[in-house]
Image (spheres, rainbow, N blue to C red):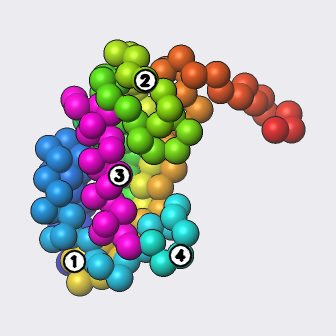
């Protein structure tokens, strides 16, 4: 696929999977042997991604990813986006699972790198500002400054 086709496929993935909650699209675009590099080796990428999307949309029913930039070179696509939503359900991921819904709106920066093979995602690297999410939900978060040890 060309760089432009991969960029379009990536944008469609954000729209269908996260913004619309279309879990069937996960099966279409994610390779079953792929790797989410934020998860332990051996994690089933397809099952895990469906669980993450479901948990995010239950916690933030108006979940939306706005992609600000998308770059592609070779088989890699990189994006910078902002995740927005209103905290209306429990966020059943990590330490925030115990937090009851706050009704607060969030806007959290994300960056993703996707590697494609035969038109399907085989690798995902992802970073997001969890500290900012915690602060926006009213959860105490560390305040680390440049040059300060954690």
From what the image shows, is residue 5 above or below residue 69?
below
Please state which of residues 82 and 23 is positioned toward the viewer in this rendering.
23
What is the C-alpha distance between the residues marked 1 and 4? 23 Å
The answer to which image quadrant residue 30 occupies is: bottom left
Residue located at (64% from left, 22% from top): 140
Q: Say which quadrant the C terminus sits in.
A: top right
Magenta extent: 44-62
- The mark lying in front, picked from 1 and 4, is 4
**Where does residue 28 sit, x and y in percent of width and height?**
15, 71
What is the C-alpha distance between the residues marked 2 and 1? 39 Å
Residue located at (38% from left, 32% from top): 90
How many other residues sit within 10 Å of disc 3, few (<14), some (14-19) or many (≥20)?
some
**Considering only order in the chain, which callout, 3 or 1, is on the residue closer to the N terminus?**
3
What is the C-alpha distance between the residues marked 3 and 4? 17 Å
**Considering only order in the chain, which callout, 3 or 2, is on the residue closer to the N terminus?**
3
Q: Name the residue under label 4.
A: 41
Q: What mark, if any, has residue 119 been given in the picture?
A: 1
What is the C-alpha distance between the residues marked 2 and 3? 18 Å
């Amino acid at each position: 696929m060309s760089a432009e086709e991969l960029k379009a496929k990536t944008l469609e993935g954000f729209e269908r999977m996260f913004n619309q909650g279309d879990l069937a699209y996960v099966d279409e675009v994610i390779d079953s042997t792929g790797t989410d590099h934020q998860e332990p080796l051996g994690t089933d990428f397809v099952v895990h991604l469906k669980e993450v999307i479901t948990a995010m949309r239950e916690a933030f029913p108006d979940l939306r990813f706005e992609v600000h930039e998308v770059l592609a070179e070779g088989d890699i696509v990189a994006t910078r986006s902002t995740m927005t939503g209103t905290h209306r359900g429990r966020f059943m991921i990590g330490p925030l699972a115990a937090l009851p819904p706050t009704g607060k709106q969030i806007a959290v920066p994300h960056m993703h790198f996707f590697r494609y093979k035969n038109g399907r995602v085989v690798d995902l690297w992802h970073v997001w500002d969890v500290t900012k999410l915690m602060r926006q939900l009213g959860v105490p978060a560390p305040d680390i400054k440049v040059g300060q040890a954690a």
